[in-house]
Image (spheres, helix red, strand yellow):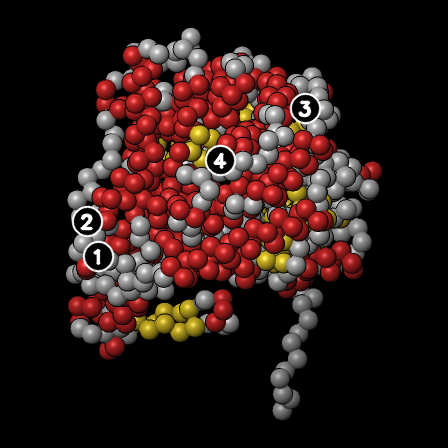
Amino acid sequence: MSSTTSSIVAQRLLLPSLLSLLLLIVTVISDDASTMPTQNMSHKERAELREESREMFYHAYRAYMENAYPADELMPLSCKGRYRGVTASRGDMDDILGNFSMTLVDTLDTLVLLGDFAEFEHAVKLVIRDVQFDSDIIVSVFETNIRMVGGLLSAHILAEYLQKQADVMHWYKGEMLEMARELGYRLLPAFNTTTGIPHARVNLRLGMKDPQLKKSRETCTACAGTILLEFAALSRLTGDPIFEVRAHAAMDALWKLRHRGSDLMGTVLNVHSGDWVRRDSGVGAGIDSYYEYLFKSYVLLGDDKYLARFNRHYNAVMKYVSEGPMLLDVLMHRPHAKSRNFMDSLLAFWPGLQVLSGDLKPAVQTHEMLYQVMQMHTLIPEAWTVDFQIHWGQHHLRPEFIESTYFLYRATGDHHYLQVGKRALKTLQKYAKVSCGYAAVNDVRTGKHEDRMDSFVLSETFKYLFLLFSDPQDLIINVDEFVFTTEAHLLPLSIAQLGNSTFSFRQSDEHNVLDFMRTCPSSNKLFPEKVRKPLRNFITGSCPRTISGKRLSALDFQASNADHLRAVYDMGITMVSVGDRSQGKVRLFHSFYNAKSQEEGEMGLQFMQEMLELTKMQSMNQLAQLQAVAYAVDEQSQDWTALMAGPSHFSPELIGEQFVEGEIVLANPLRACDEKLENASDISGKILVAERGDCTFVSKARLAQKVGATALIVCDNVSGSSGETQPMFAMSGDGKDDVAIPVVFMYSLEFTKLSAAMLRRPQLRARIMQMVEFKRWQLAKEAHQNETAAAAAAAALAAGTMPKKKPDKEL
């Protein structure tokens, strides 16, 4: 072994002690009683929660095995399996499915962590007997790698571990490793690109020769950058270097595409040209696990170039994307410009990664923000706005928040994180558990379920819950000797020692010494409780705080903040609820006589003026984006009415005097997720209506465009929703710019009115346009009618034909 290799191995032997070191530091610091957590969890309660998390896993696992296997997923409401090509299509979402029993493969290593060797052995035999990959099916390279290749590798490693440590499974001869190698070869054609960055999808049998993949050009940063851990492990376990070589090349190509000024990455790129398609940069969807795999590739493989790259990106993220505890997307080429006003739930992995890299304080802060979002909405929604309102209401039982909670507890020993985990567990039990497993929540506002239980619920969500409430001595393996992949599969740190000395991936001229100098921050006086305490008011304002002398502005005002309410009361402002209290609408009144002092009365007057201007600005901004679906009140009338609709980010924007007009027709089936619509021949040249659900908005739009619709109206599937009481909803796409027809979103109460008009007039014609343009059009019509009436009256008066008005009362 070379001296360089020896040095790397020596460094690697220190890495498993990172969490132990952090725990030791925090334990020493926490001697100050004033900073101790206020509510410790007893060993008894923790053990009960550990067993409850085990029961949750088995409730879902048995539901899958008894009602869905060998399907890829369980549909918990239908209580049957989801098969590709058999179950109704959900569009691009189904690219994760390959008819290869994904949930079972993804779940194998969880069985080992639970200590269920008998069921693990039974499941391994089923996988070896039933799972095959020679199918004419297009799958996601990213999802197939992290769920299937990672699941097979982890199960293989643990099977060999149990042979030695538990004296079981002596019949096992490495079959799952060979299955992983076969699947890896079926994914390799995706890497045949100009840049070396893999395509997003590949056909398991035909590779890239499938006609549907001829136009394949784009992939996301996370999709291309979340390959190396599994492919490196595959190469080192099989002795076949091709997988690791291709994965390193993809990571190198991605690194070269960073913006050299900001060190940020975009989210979607062209795999042939290397051009960025979407330049949004953050830590959530589309980019998340790229950062994770940079750091973990250093941990697993010992190659410092990945640490240097991670540090460069991390510094950029903390400089441009981090806003206190929030993480807001920016443009990679203009990093001071925010690219969107919401955050998505996938960024919840970030505090856990910060813990692993040694940056505890911001990890505690962001986790606290996420916990408050959960408390505010019961479940963490798929996305929320900068003022913590719901942007996308789904909750898919994702593991990222629980994952970060686990790593924060391991690093700090703070029982606060056990209490957070307890709340997350109880919430899942109350709102997601059904008789046949656990169901995703379609909208956290209504609690309505979705017929969906992703494989990561068993492979990650319940695994991290079980680990959170377990002591190291409770586990059959020492998890500190493993790296968790992004799908929570376990790869041993010893893999680094299997490296081939002929490979040298170090590029010493690429990085300077500063790239290696971001180490653990000073932990002087750092304890999570001290970091969380100032953030307790961040969303809810539930804890009292000292009011500074600074005047409260209308822009900063929050009606849920007790300090703000006291401040406006002292200014002489009273608040009166308007209409239904559940809508949260209030009216403000100001009186100098009620003010605490003359000075505060004047501050109150200024506050009211600011509030008036703010309301006008918000109304104008919303009105500018608001769409209208307008139609004539009846066939004879010249009067039109308009219903509110929200825009989309992936379709042409109707601005100015632009509009689309046509007859309205309902899709059949209404959700428009099948490849063919039964009434496709009746849609050409008309405006199509489809219901939200089962597949993505952009999938519905592409299907509508394919059958010749001139526009698409997507109606909400949440009963009772209305644009009058809920914020405007803007539909997001997948980064591809291929929709050429306008697409608008309509809440259910507005669609009920449209449906009633369609029933009265089966061939109802409507016009889609900007709401502000509809208002101008109506005003122009009224002005024209008034001018016509005035001209007619003047002409009649001049001709002497104007009827005389009868006296009100005859004398």
Q: Secondary structure at mark 1?
A: helix
Amino acid at pointer 2: Ile
Q: In the displayed orientation, state which residue is furthest to the top.
A: 502
Residue 546 is situated, as x and y percent measured from the top left of the image, at 20, 63
Which of pointers 4 and 1 lies earlier in the amino acid sequence?
A: 1
Separation of disc 4 and disc 2 at Cα? 38 Å
Return the mark for residue 204. Answer: 3
Return the mark for residue 165. Answer: 4
Amino acid at pointer 3: Leu
Q: Residues within 10 Å of mark 2 (few under 14, many from 20)?
A: some
Q: Are marks 1 and 2 in contact (CB under 8 Å)?
A: yes
Amino acid at pointer 1: Thr
The residue beneath circle 1 is 35
Q: Secondary structure at mark 2?
A: helix
Which of pointers 3 and 1 lies earlier in the amino acid sequence?
A: 1
Separation of disc 3 and disc 2 at Cα? 54 Å
Residue 248 is situated, as x and y percent measured from the top left of the image, at 46, 18
* Image quarter hosting the N terminus: top left
Q: Residues within 10 Å of mark 3 (few under 14, many from 20)?
A: many
Q: Are marks 4 and 1 in contact (CB under 8 Å)?
A: no
The image quarter in which residue 587 lies: bottom left
The residue beneath circle 2 is 29
Which of pointers 3 and 4 lies earlier in the amino acid sequence?
A: 4
Separation of disc 3 and disc 1 at Cα? 56 Å
Mark 1, mark 2: which one is toward the viewer? 2
Which of pointers 4 and 2 lies earlier in the amino acid sequence?
A: 2
